[in-house]
Amino acid sequence: MIPLNKRIMFCHFKFLTSNSLVFIYALQWLLMWVMGDH
């Protein structure tokens, strides 16, 4: 059986990787908006 803290770390890792894609997409969109604004 996997230790609890390892399982929690794995869940957080999965959550962060899926969220980082959204974050990168939002960051690119924001950068395009800022560059296009000037």
Image: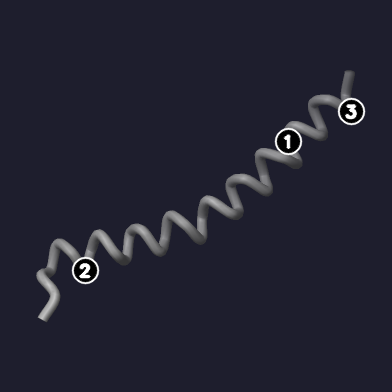
Q: Which corner quadrant of the image does residue 3 belong to?
A: bottom left
Q: In the rendered view, would you say 32 is above or below 38?
A: below
Q: In the rendered view, would you say 7 is above or below 33?
A: below
What residue is drawn where x is 51% and y is 61%?
18
Q: In the rendered view, would you say 30 is above or below 21?
A: above
Secondary element under disc 3, as helix, strand or loop, is helix
Q: Which mark is residue 36?
A: 3
Colour scheme used in the picture? one colour
What residue is drawn where x is 89% and y is 28%?
36
Q: Is residue 27 left or right of residue 8?
A: right
Q: Tell me residue 10's x, y (percent).
A: 29, 64
Secondary element under disc 1, as helix, strand or loop, is helix
The amino acid sitting under disc 3 is: Gly
What residue is drawn where x is 47% and y is 57%?
17
The amino acid sitting under disc 1 is: Leu
Q: Is residue 33 left or right of residue 6?
A: right
Provide the residue designation for mark 1.
30
Q: Which corner quadrant of the image does residue 5 belong to?
A: bottom left
